[in-house]
């Protein structure tokens, strides 16, 4: 881990060294001890926090999670650095045109040039989160996430109520 962090710190702006949440980091015994330091809002997140209901991201500035949505609610917490969220409501049906599973092929940077008027008219809300900020992402909300700095982020999915929704699952290829 020391070598990885050194590499992230020296990387500059790149998407090459992004430790994404899909690696189930918090399930590993060496990382599980970090959960002892997490103080989730009482009544909002289950206690004790289930390791499988968490995600950890670490990476340099410039890391990008492409435009996608999740089928669970997420409490996203920024620990170090800043991230920019570009948020789009699930009611923006232009994003359903040709999804690839939970991902949209729409290029947010070029939507003004899109052929379809609904894509050009997408309402995108920008939010920047910094250290100590948390952002609640409801299931179905589309988002692209870009690290503005070296970044460490953590999310919680362990809500005490059911947190998996099948109502918003576009087809995939």
Image (spheres, rainbow, N blue to C red):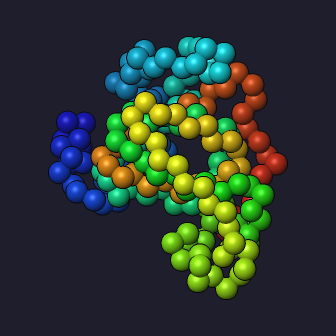
Give the camera-side residue of 122 and 42. Answer: 122
Whether residue 65 sits left or right of residue 29 in the image: it is right
**Quadrant of the image occupied by residue 29:** top left
Look at 23% across and 43% down and name the residue there: 4
Residue 23, how many percent across, how many down?
45, 42
Look at 21% across and 46% down and name the residue there: 9
The answer to whether residue 115 shows anywhere in this view is yes
Look at 47% across and 47% down and name the residue there: 128
**Quadrant of the image occupied by residue 99:** bottom right
The answer to whether residue 20 shows anywhere in this view is no
**Quadrant of the image occupied by residue 72:** top right
Residue 65, how many percent across, how many down?
48, 56
Look at 39% across and 51% down and name the residue there: 147
Q: Please, is residue 80 above or below residue 65 in the view?
A: above
Query: Where, quadrant-wise, is the C terminus in this rendering?
Result: bottom right
Residue 5, how many percent across, how many down?
23, 41
Whether residue 158 sits left or right of residue 59 in the image: it is right
Whether residue 126 sits left or right of residue 100 in the image: it is left
Q: Please, is residue 32 above or below residue 157 in the view?
A: above
Residue 36, how many percent across, how many down?
42, 15
Q: Please, is residue 85 above or below residue 55 in the view?
A: below
Query: Where, quadrant-wise, is the N terminus in this rendering?
Result: top left
């Amino acid at each position: 881990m020391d070598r990885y962090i050194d590499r992230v710190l020296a990387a500059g702006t790149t998407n090459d060294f992004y430790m994404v949440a899909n690696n189930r980091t918090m399930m590993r015994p060496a990382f599980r001890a970090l959960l002892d330091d997490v103080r989730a809002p009482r009544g909002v997140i289950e206690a004790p926090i289930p390791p499988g209901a968490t995600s950890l991201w670490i990476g340099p500035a410039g890391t990008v999670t492409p435009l996608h949505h999740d089928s669970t609610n997420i409490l996203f917490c920024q620990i170090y650095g800043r991230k920019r969220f570009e948020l789009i409501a699930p009611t923006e049906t232009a994003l359903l045109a040709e999804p690839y599973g939970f991902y949209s092929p729409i290029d947010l940077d070029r939507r003004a040039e899109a052929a379809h008027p609904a894509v050009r008219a997408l309402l995108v809300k920008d939010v920047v989160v910094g250290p100590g900020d948390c952002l609640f992402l409801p299931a179905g909300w589309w988002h692209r996430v870009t690290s503005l700095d070296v970044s460490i982020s953590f999310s919680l999915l362990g809500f005490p109520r059911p947190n998996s929704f099948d109502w918003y699952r576009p087809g995939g290829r």
